[in-house]
Amino acid sequence: MRHKQSDYMHWSKTQSRARFNLATSGVAPFPFRELPVDLEKLEINGDNSYGYAPLQGAIAAHHGVDPESVMESAGTSMANHLAMAAILEPGDEALIERPAYGPILDVAQYLQANVKRFPRTEENGWAVDPEAIRHCVTPRTRLIVVTNLHNPTSVLTPDSVLREIGDIARSVGALVLVDEVYLDAVYEETPRTSFHIGPEFVVTSSLTKVYGVSGLRCGWILARPDLAWKMRRLNDLYSATPVYPGELLSVVAFKHLNLLRERACRIVEADRKLLRDFLKQQSVLSAVRTDCGTTSFVQLRDRNVDFFLERLRAKFDTSAVPGSFFGMPDHFRIGMGVNTEMFAEGLRRIGRALEECETTKL
Ligand SMILES: Cc1ncc(COP(=O)(O)O)c(C=O)c1O
């Protein structure tokens, strides 16, 4: 049977909610009333057969690329799907980082790729090690996939390393897919998209995670124009046209991106400080320190993490993402950037749950 589902996505939609929800990865929703929208100009139908030109232009300008290289998609989820589906044939090798965001693996498996994994290790600060990729790559490799920032750890991969990955890919005629949905959560000296590094780079991103407008589903792919066209033609099989009002609102969001970003940045930074102070006090918890991003991947020693998180949710109304969804069952992921009061109380409750585990030896 072909793989046709995402266990992580299902868990996230049905099991992750709690009053103190630290199972998030995106920032707080940006309220519609604070977006300077001229409702008179909103329309339901418009000229958007292969995307709405002003939105394509806004995405292109945001990244400093040619609009021909921009392909609109429904979020980064659909962007990843289209990019992989356009590149991979059944049996092709796809090299995917470990730990990885589950749905990326699920899509590759659904497409019947031969999925191979290369490790990012905690001892190495979760960095991408080009040697590990070189070790896995073969003449059958068609695609190398990384997230930057990395989900779940938020570690940033520098251009020098991405360039090395590009060289490895080129040596076997493969492409590199970089999911940059969290990259703009580097609030200072935000790196340019890796699309500029070379023609073997394909990039996916969206306004969903870092800008708080997930409901607009404004996502995109950056690819060589010929590949971008392949993806547009493939997308014809999935959806005739994008949602026009969503495109109009996305153009407005792009016009006010700084407004969206600054608000989120304040919350993310306040939460990061709280998390650092909290981790310092906890002897059984540790995490690689990062200065950017909306998630932290925390190791819990000498405890059953799944059991701990179940109790945390049931008794303390607090949730976090089990590391088992990333293939690391002794970790869990904490999300920042939604609401600092809620975050602080969530951490306090994790602390209380840990104390309770200690006294009851659970
Ligand atoms: C690495 C990564 N890519 C893609 C997505 C999906 O993004 P979107 O909401 O834009 O579809 C997520 C969501 O958590 C993610 O973490």
Image (cartoon, rainbow, N blue to C red):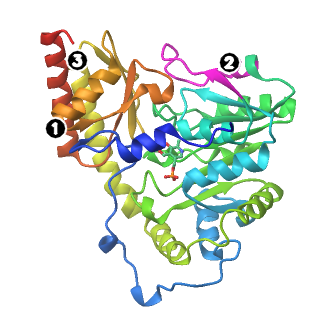
Give above or below for 288 relative to 198: above
Would residue 286 appear left or right of 283 to someone viewing this image? right
Q: Position of residue 207 (x, y in %)?
A: 49, 58
Q: Position of residue 134 (x, y in %)?
A: 75, 20
Q: Quadrant of residue 333?
A: top left
Sequence-wise first label, 1 or 2 = 2
- Disc 2 secondary structure class: helix
Q: Residue furthest front?
A: 1
**Viewer-proximal residue among 274 and 48:** 48
Give above or below for 289 relative to 316: above
The residue that label 3 is drawn on is 282
Q: Position of residue 25 (x, y in %)?
A: 40, 43
Asked if marks 3 and 2 touch (Cβ < 8 Å), the reply is no
Measure the C-alpha gap from mark 1 to mark 2: 40 Å
User: What is the magenta range?
Assistant: 115-134
The residue that label 1 is drawn on is 345
Q: Position of residue 186 (x, y in %)?
A: 46, 43
- Disc 1 secondary structure class: helix
Q: Amino acid at mark 1?
A: Glu
Determine if the magenta segment contains residue 128. yes
